[in-house]
Structure formats: C-alpha cells, structure tokens
C-alpha cells in the first residue's frame, strides 16, 4: 500500500512540474526589444531608475527563455541588411522596428522616481509603466504599470533596488499579457501582412491559392493599385511557414516569386 502511495505521489509531482513548465513557457520564438523612454531633460535619478528597470526586465525575460534583442548589436546588423537590400529602413515606418531591430515585439517603458528627503532617511520610490507593441502592425497589445520602494546605503543604492523590484513586478504582468496574445493568435490565427508587386491578375491568382489553404482563415485586401497590393492574411501558422507554402503553390501554378524583404509578420514580394 505504501509503495502504491509513493508511486502516486511521484506521479503527482511529475504532473505538477510539467504544468509549471508549461505555464512558464514563453512566446515561442518571438523576439523582444526593450526601449527606454529617455528624454533630453532626463535627470540622473531617472536614468539610474531606467537602467535598474531595464536590467531587471532583461534578467526576468532571459531566465524564462525569451529572446531579448541587444539593441547595439541589432543596429549593426540593420546597417548590413540595409546595405545588402539597398533600402533605407527609415522609409518604411511599419517595418522600421522589425527591420532595424530584428524583433517582433517591443516593450516601451518609462519611469517616475521620487527620492526621500535625506534628513528623514535614505529611500526611493520608482514607478514604471510600459506597453508591449506588435511591431508589424504598430499595435499595442498590453499596457501595465508597477511601483516599488526601497531604502539603501545611499540614494543611488535605494533607487537601484526599487527600480529592479518595480521592473520585476512589471515584467511579470507584461509576460502574462504577451503569452495570452500569442496563445490567442495560435487559437484564432495571427495576422500576416504580405505586399505583392506585379501584375494584378497574378496577384488575384495568389489570393485564390491562399484562400484554399487549410491554414488560412481569411484573406483581406487592404490596399491595391499601381501594380501593388497589400493583403492581411489570418492564419494559424508562422509567417515563414506560410511563405514556404506560398512558394510551393506559386511554383505549381508557374508563378515566379522573389522575396524582397521580411520583418516581423510582414513580407514584400515581387511577382516575376
């Protein structure tokens, strides 16, 4: 009897561990860019608070398997991409974040810091608010705020402690919102934007092929004219998977496609 109870206990622990791991699983393959709202008149205390929040957010996200883009490295990569594709990333606002920083989502945050009167003790209160932005459509998918206070050996120490605590609280809330968004996209379908440059008749044939695909729920034409058409496609697959399927279908119909560029959930194609 004791042996059976031991086995049941082990099974319960295994199931609990599996559930915990599933709950902690981050957005699959999605990359995040953190942006500090630094103005020209930012004070030293705000810069210190933003640095503490930033470090705390990066630590929380990377510990849970998220892919956080290093902005400095991404900027160098963007220069290489721009030179290779002979395009200026600034010209396309919808693609600017994805192309320039190689990230599907951005977290834009700002802080407000209150320092305690030194005569009454050393302490700081850091308030932080943030928004998660879907870079492809420049759409806000979650907005949260948090705050934390702390004492310290010095004002700088108090600010850093409060900022890191506030950053952790905020990121916990934001990650839940992002995971819910990704899960919803998986269930209902994510929006993939495709821009086609070429003859209208060929574009219509591609639309017909996409509409017949099992992974595609709907195809909506949002812009057309001048040899260019922009489509919003709701599908239950990733952009790269849909693109491979599109190339396969186009090849069967004798349509030659050349991908000009892609970023986030958006891609641009030329019909040959």
Image: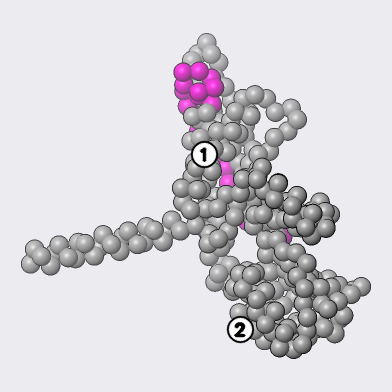
**Circle 1 — which element?**
helix
Q: Quadrant of the C terminus?
A: bottom right
Task: List the residue tagged with mark 2.
Answer: 214
Please state if 264 lies on the left or on the right of 121 as rendered: right
List x then y, in percent, for residue 67. 55, 53
Instruction: Look at the picture and state if 215 lies above or below 160.
Output: below
Please state if 201 lies on the left or on the right of 121 as rendered: right
Cα separation between marks 1 and 2: 42 Å
Residue in front for this viewpoint, 101 or 272: 272
List x then y, in percent, for residue 51. 59, 33
Q: Is residue 179 magenta?
A: no
Task: List the residue tagged with mark 1.
Answer: 56
Spot the residue most to the top: 119
Q: Which mark is residue 106?
A: none
Report which quarter residue 243 is drawn in. bottom right
Which residue occupies 69% across, 50% down? Answer: 77
């Amino acid at each position: 009897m004791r042996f059976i109870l031991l086995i049941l206990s082990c099974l319960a622990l295994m199931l609990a561990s599996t559930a915990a791991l599933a709950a902690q699983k981050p957005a699959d393959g999605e990359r995040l860019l953190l942006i500090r709202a630094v103005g020209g008149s930012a004070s030293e205390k705000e810069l210190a608070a933003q640095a503490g929040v930033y470090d705390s957010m990066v630590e929380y996200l990377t510990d849970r398997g998220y892919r956080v883009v290093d902005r400095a490295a991404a900027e160098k990569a963007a220069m290489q991409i721009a030179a290779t594709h002979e395009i200026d990333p600034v010209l396309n606002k919808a693609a600017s974040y994805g192309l320039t920083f190689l990230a599907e989502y951005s977290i834009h945050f700002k802080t407000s810091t209150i320092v305690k009167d030194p005569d009454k003790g050393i302490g700081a209160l850091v308030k932080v608010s943030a928004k998660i932005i879907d870079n492809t459509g420049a759409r806000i998918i979650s907005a949260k705020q948090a705050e934390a206070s702390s004492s310290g050996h010095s004002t700088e120490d108090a600010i850093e402690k409060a900022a890191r605590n506030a950053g952790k609280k905020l990121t916990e809330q934001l990650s839940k919102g992002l995971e819910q968004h990704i899960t919803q996209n998986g269930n209902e379908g994510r929006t993939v934007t495709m821009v086609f440059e070429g003859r209208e008749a060929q574009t219509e044939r591609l639309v017909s092929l996409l509409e017949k695909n099992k992974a595609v729920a709907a195809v909506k034409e949002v812009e057309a004219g001048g040899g260019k058409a922009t489509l919003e496609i709701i599908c239950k697959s990733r952009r790269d998977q849909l693109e491979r399927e599109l190339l396969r279908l186009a090849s069967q119909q004798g349509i030659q496609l050349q991908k000009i560029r892609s970023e986030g959930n958006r891609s641009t194609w030329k019909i040959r």
